[in-house]
Amino acid sequence: MPSRDALPPTPRRHVAFAFALVALLAGLAGCRQPAGVEARDDAQAAGEPVPAARPVDAVYVLRDRLLARDGVGFARVAVPPAIHADLRRAWRDGRSRWPLDELPLDARIPAMLAALQAPDADRRLMATFRRQFAGADADIDQAVRTLMVFGGEYVQRDPGYSADERDHAAQAIAAVGRWAIAAPLDDPARAQRFFTVLSAAAVRSGIDGKAGWPAFAALGMTQSLNRLSPFFATLLAQLRQQYGLDIDASLRSLRVSLVEQTGDRARLRLQYTLAGTPIDTLATAVRIDGRWYLADYVQSAQRSLGAASPPGR
């Protein structure tokens, strides 16, 4: 059974690096704290985002945290306070890496950082790029098409995805695939800027990729998200500047409507545009202690803790 951490063999692995990161951002964009604002663990910190009071706001509060580049706030409003506290403890113990495990290829994040932090990383990556893909537009297009098929298959087979997540992921993979085929991914000049800027951002994160997940456990959830956030923000900017993929525009296009509500459970319709492709999908929100949360996020957070399904499932 394919897993979220699986990758097709080389040379498709090199295209998979960029392609999977884009797919990752389609579901959960990289975040950072606003400039000059230091994240605090205190749940009553001034100006902290408030969890959703209405079903549709279960999506909008998350969208707003992403646009605000507030990754710590995203994690806080995505799950109830008690689960959030458990997650923080589990991070320190090395038992959870939620919300990072919402992302495709999440297990490869330390290795990715390590590769980008290596001496002369941009030069080495460019050497690989020139050897494999410079001017090879047809080869890249075929690799992207292969990844679209591969990604669609493991999303459909992985039991960690709900039916709604499978539908959403299938649409996102198709949209990102169409973007990737049209994007100038074979352009050496763009690739050089991309790798140089991303490598510097990985070094600035201060997270030792070679140390693996224990480095994240030592930092804890809040500091890990804070240190990763500028890296993902840089990635977003480079995807927009070099390749024309504007994730923020997708987030701003989001429209959420209530399909039905029965007690503490609601069905939502999400519509937005990703890389020029309309996305139309459904999600479930659940009310816990008077606040609304996306059920899939709560369930996956609890699963990372080894807990039972959330109320309303």
Image (cartoon, rainbow, N blue to C red):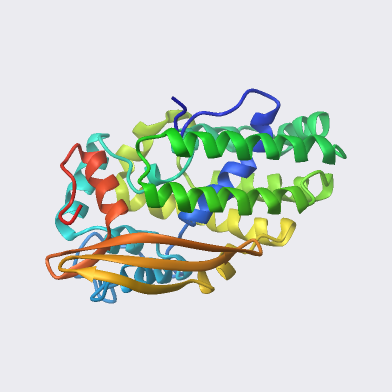
Compared to 4, does 58 lie above or below? below
Count of numbered circles in the view = 0
Q: Nearer the viewer, residue 222 or 163?
A: 163
* Residue 231 seen in this snapshot: no
Q: Is residue 149 left or right of residue 216?
A: right
Residue 68 is drawn in which quadrant? bottom left
- Residue drawn at x 85%, y 37% is 136
Q: Is residue 134 left or right of residue 277?
A: right
Q: Position of residue 43 (x, y in %)?
A: 19, 65
* Residue 151 seen in this snapshot: yes
Residue 49 is drawn in which quadrant? bottom left
Q: Position of residue 142 (x, y in %)?
A: 75, 36
Q: Position of residue 227 (x, y in %)?
A: 43, 51
Q: Nearer the viewer, residue 108 or 136?
A: 136
- Residue drawn at x 54%, y 73% is 253
Work out which residue is located at the far left of the displayed protein and give it: 289
Compared to 83, does 156 lie above or below? above
- Residue drawn at x 24%, y 58% is 79
> Dividing the image into 4 quarters, which one contains the N terminus?
top left
Work out which residue is located at the far right of the displayed protein and give it: 135
Q: Position of residue 133 (x, y in %)?
A: 80, 35
